[in-house]
């Protein structure tokens, strides 16, 4: 009987053979997580590697997430306005339980309370102080500053005021960050796809353009085009102590680092259904990368549930006509071991104190607020 890690490796071969006869299939076996290391199990039992006390805490957190009470649905399907979303690409929850929603399609940010009332909002496509050139990700600093990374590699900072937001500054950074997280007033993002050594980087909100440090083990196989594809992913920051988790979008792999860049652990996903990325060469010698195919699975969300836990959401689709199913895992941050929470209504996009938010994707996305009982993580 194959070990759990070998199941994921075997899936790469099966899907690749079914979908392509030529070219190199990625990810390669050498990049797979160690099957003897931490794994996210496909069952809902506490990970066997945890001691009895840690297993009991893990089970209690999982139950708190599952037993959360459904609250407001944010977003409309018609009528326009700030509650009609085009593409919800990032969500954050502040210390007061207010929900910040980044709508990339409308280049807008809207703030809601936990019952769905609009509290503030701004944006629009353009070059103005309160406008964006395709916003990608957002973060909330400890001092309340809102940071938004926009297309072209720049951080825009805003101060929350009683009647909205005020523009503070725009700071170029050296790369295009598709993922970002914040711990305290420290900003961590992707390092810019080859511009700097390492997959991740820490940036200062007020400059300089170059990162304060770069670190992280990137996918290093194949052409530059392949590496750009395979190194896409999601970030989550944990505090006390400060750590940075990175999950690869199209690989069954999550890494945890200290905020200073020291490696802590790598976890695999036991029953991951690997889609295919095939690199071939054109007649003129240039590489061509093809992705897609079914069945497949990809990471769609990574959130810190507290200082002690991480929630990772993978979306699995078994055929072109099948529904894509979000599967959420709860990971013990101290060890990297985790197991399934269950299938969710939408993808978990953000977790705060006593509540979390899922995104119901569609032509006009909506958000669902979930209220956890007192003493829950977040």
Image (spheres, rainbow, N blue to C red):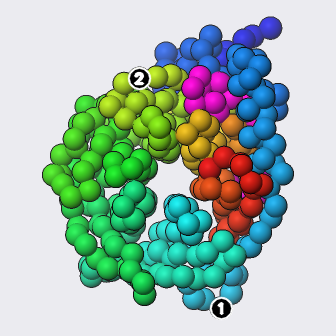
Residue 307 visible, this orientation:
yes
Farthest-out residue, left: 208
Report the mark closest to the observer, 1 or 2.
2
Q: Residue at x 66, y 46 (%)?
A: 377
Q: Is residue 121 above or below residue 280?
A: below
Residue 148 occupies which quadrant of the picture? bottom left
In the image, the segment drawn in magenta is 331-347
Q: CA distance from mark 1 to mark 2?
A: 49 Å
Left or right of 12 on screen, residue 95: left
Q: Tag 2 or tag 1, which sits nearer the N-term?
A: 1
Q: Quadrant of residue 79?
A: bottom right
Q: Which residue is mark 1?
A: 79
Q: State whether residue 268 appears in this view.
A: no
Expressed as whole percent of the image width and height from the top left, the position of residue 141 reads 38, 58
In the image, is residue 339 part of the stretch drawn in magenta? yes
Q: Which mark is residue 285?
A: none
Residue at numbered disc 2: 263
Name which quarter of the figure residue 119 lies in. bottom right
């Amino acid at each position: 009987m194959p070990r759990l890690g070998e199941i994921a490796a075997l899936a790469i071969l099966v899907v690749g053979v079914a979908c392509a006869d030529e070219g190199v299939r990625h990810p390669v076996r050498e990049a797979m997580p160690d099957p003897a290391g931490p794994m996210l199990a496909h069952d809902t039992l506490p990970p066997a590697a945890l001691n009895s006390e840690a297993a009991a805490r893990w089970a209690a957190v999982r139950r708190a997430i599952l037993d959360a009470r459904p609250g407001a649905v944010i977003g409309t399907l018609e009528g326009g306005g700030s509650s009609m979303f085009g593409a919800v690409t990032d969500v954050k929850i502040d210390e007061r339980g207010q929900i910040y929603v980044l709508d990339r399609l409308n280049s807008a940010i809207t703030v809601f309370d936990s019952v769905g009332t609009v509290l503030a909002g701004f944006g629009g496509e353009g070059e103005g102080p309160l406008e964006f050139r395709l916003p990608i990700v957002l973060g909330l600093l400890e001092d309340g500053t809102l940071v938004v990374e926009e297309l072209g590699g720049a951080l825009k900072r805003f101060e929350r005021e009683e009647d909205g937001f005020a523009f503070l500054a725009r700071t170029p950074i050296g790369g295009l960050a598709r993922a970002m997280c914040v711990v305290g007033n420290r900003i961590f993002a992707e390092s810019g796809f080859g511009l700097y050594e390492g997959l991740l980087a820490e940036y200062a909100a007020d400059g300089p353009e170059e990162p304060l440090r770069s670190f992280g083990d990137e996918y290093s196989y194949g052409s530059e085009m392949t590496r750009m594809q395979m190194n896409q992913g999601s970030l989550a920051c944990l505090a006390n102590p400060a750590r940075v988790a990175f999950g690869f979008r199209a690989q069954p792999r999550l890494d945890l680092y200290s905020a200073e860049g020291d490696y802590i652990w790598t976890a695999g996903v036991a029953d991951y259904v690997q889609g295919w990325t095939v690199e071939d060469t054109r007649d003129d010698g240039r590489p061509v990368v093809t992705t897609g195919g079914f069945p497949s699975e990809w990471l769609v969300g990574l959130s810190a549930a507290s200082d002690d836990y991480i929630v990772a959401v993978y979306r699995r689709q078994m055929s072109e006509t099948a529904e894509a199913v979000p599967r959420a895992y709860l990971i013990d941050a101290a060890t990297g071991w985790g197991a399934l929470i269950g299938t969710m209504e939408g993808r978990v996009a953000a977790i705060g104190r006593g509540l979390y938010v899922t995104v119901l994707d569609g032509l006009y996305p909506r958000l669902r607020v979930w209220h956890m009982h007192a003493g829950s993580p977040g």
